[in-house]
Image (spheres, rainbow, N blue to C red):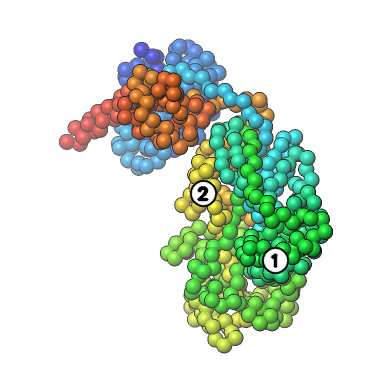
Amino acid sequence: MKKIGVFVCHCGRNISATVNINKVVEEIKKYPGVVFCTDYQYMCSDPGQDLIKKNIKDKKLDGIVIAACSPSLHELTFRNTAEKAGLNPYLTEIANIREQCSWVHSDIKEATPKAISIIESIIEKAKLNESLSPVKVKVNPKALVIGGGIAGIQASLDIANSGHKVILIEKSPSIGGHMAQLSETFPTLDCSQCILTPKMVEVFQHENINLYVYSELEEISGSVGNFKIKIRRKASYVDNSKCTGCGVCSEKCPVSVDSEFDEGMGKRKAIYTPFPQAVPNKPVIDKENCTYFLKDGKCGVCQVVCTLNAIDFKQKDEIIEEEVGAVVVATGYELYPMKNMLEYGAGEYPDVINGLQFERLLSASGPTQGEIHRPSDNKIPKRIAFISCVGSRDPEHHLPYCSKICCMYMVKHALLYKEHVPDGEAIVFSIDIRTSGKDYEEFLTRAKEEGNILYIRGKPARIIKQGNDLVVWCINTLTGKQLRVKCDMVVLSMSMVPSSGALDLAKALRIHTNDFGFFTEAHPKLRPVESLVPGFYLAGTAQGPKDIPDTVSQASGAAAKVLTLFSSDEISHSPIIASVDEDLCSGCGICITTCPYDAREMDERKKIVSVNEILCEGCGACISACPSGASQQKNLTDIQIDNMISVLLRSNAKALEREC
């Protein structure tokens, strides 16, 4: 029988406040198989770890149980401690008596026996643990970055500048993302294009970056260190090797449609470059609106005027295959659909617009060259209402979360409007104003003092049309008075939502999202840029609402994680994976279709299932599906689970006897 040592942590008062540690140690010492048990104030501290190492050696322990906090926090810490003492790290177990016991109880008489039973169940698991060795895998030091906004750009440059190859894919015809649409950025009011364009050009010219625009991830397989990907490069119907981006084709094209880049506030042609500073600065043909495709070749003006013969109507989508070692997800955001805000007349009243549309009106490269015109009649609006938290912080009707940036870009919009229209009135309606970033509060103060902006505390209930005016109905929550404010135009500070296609991408990558579709980090504090699946890293607003500084910081953090992965020729993969008992396997194949990681395949010669240990993540789906019990998790076998359950049931039975 194994000699098990148990080490009980006080965790300050996190555990000891509701668990009688002395009683726990006294009872565990009596448990069969336990040869040593002690406690310490902070077991994860250096003295605590030294205590563990000393007793592993002195007592010749061949299995240890640390009764402390969640294994997601310190399991690796204690495994490394055991390994330094000469014990196989996978003979270390964590009994979670903090989150699962002390934190959910206030009565020490209830928490103490529960802590004892939790530890006893883990001891039973430890008795049957086997020594395991990590699975080694070679690392391909090339990264894939999905999304060409500022997050994807920053991550790509950080990785590429460190000497590693990067594949950057962007679904639009140009990189730049939403930042390229902005007029100025808060709190410094820097020109967005002035600070973004140099980075865009650097990406395009970088020798270590292979840029694919107008492209999407088609397929991905493999695991951390060795992913195989397929990229669909959509047909642009323009030969970029011949095209010089002169723009004659767009100029002569007879078809005009709403511009996505200008958020419908301006027009573009059927063959177009999204914006003047686009990278790459090459046009694409919008097949859905091109007369040539809609009317069986009855146009072709662009082909006629192109002297370089760069127009190719026969061009097809291209599938490009690559191999990479890590993936950075930087898919960005979109704004909450205005069609959901019927109470504000969004979609019905043309003079009710969202923040990005207002940015395009403010921009010198926008559809009005920076002149603020009312969409309905092109007149200069003399009074604009700016409404915050539209779609955010509204769990009853819309989204419960705060979008973080809306307050600040609303303040920026009001200030810039006053600069463009000095005699205009800017009225800000807000629940409150959150200024969480560096110099943000000072920016708000400046706007209030210099901008001559009226702030009304209250969220409007509705907006109605009266003649040429928009009337905002609201209650001022400070005075309790009902207000009916006539305006020429209304700008809605819409909340952030994940970009379209994010959920489909999450399924393809096999990584998690939260209830709202944002990609989920492995740990909100300690692992904010890692996903729960090794090899996938998160950057920018793909993970949640954030401003540009936080987006850039997180992108660099994700790049740093990738570089850490690439710093070694090979990496270790956890050996706690599923295995197959060949004597029990019937070759039914149920587990193959059940496995979400494609880690199982049929051995056609033996007619049994085999496991690709590199791909297996130990999720246990195959084990629950296997009808013959042939699939077993290493160090979490059916026998171990049965023994753990038996201990817990006995403990519950004893507790019931005491109550009776």
Front position in the image: 468 or 131: 468
Element under label 2? Answer: helix
Q: Is residue 289 above or below residue 97?
A: below
Q: Is residue 307 above or below residue 209?
A: below
Could you tell which of marks 1 and 2 lies nearer the N-terminus? Answer: 1
How crowded is the residue under tag 2: few (<14 C-alpha within 10 Å), some, or many (20+)? few
- Which residue lies at the image location 45% right of the left edge and 11% below the top edge? 60
- Which residue lies at the image location 71% right of the left edge and 36% below the top edge? 165
Answer whether residue 233 is visible to the viewer in this image: yes
Q: What residue type is labelled 1?
A: Cys
Q: What residue type is labelled 2?
A: Asp
Res. 125 mark: none
Going by the image, does 321 lie left or right of 126? right
- Which residue lies at the image location 44% right of the left edge and 20% below the top edge? 605
Q: Position of residue 351 (x, y in %)?
A: 60, 77
Query: Which part of the image, by quadrant, shows the C terminus?
Result: top left
Res. 504 mark: 2
Going by the image, does 139 lie left or right of 362? left
Q: Position of residue 538 (x, y in %)?
A: 59, 44
User: Pointer 1 and pointer 2: residues touching (CB < 8 Å)?
Assistant: no
Query: Which part of the image, by quadrant, shows the N terminus?
Result: top left
Q: Residue furthest left?
A: 660
Q: Position of residue 423 (x, y in %)?
A: 72, 81
- The image quarter in which residue 5 lies: top left
Q: In this view, does 532 lie above or below 283?
A: above
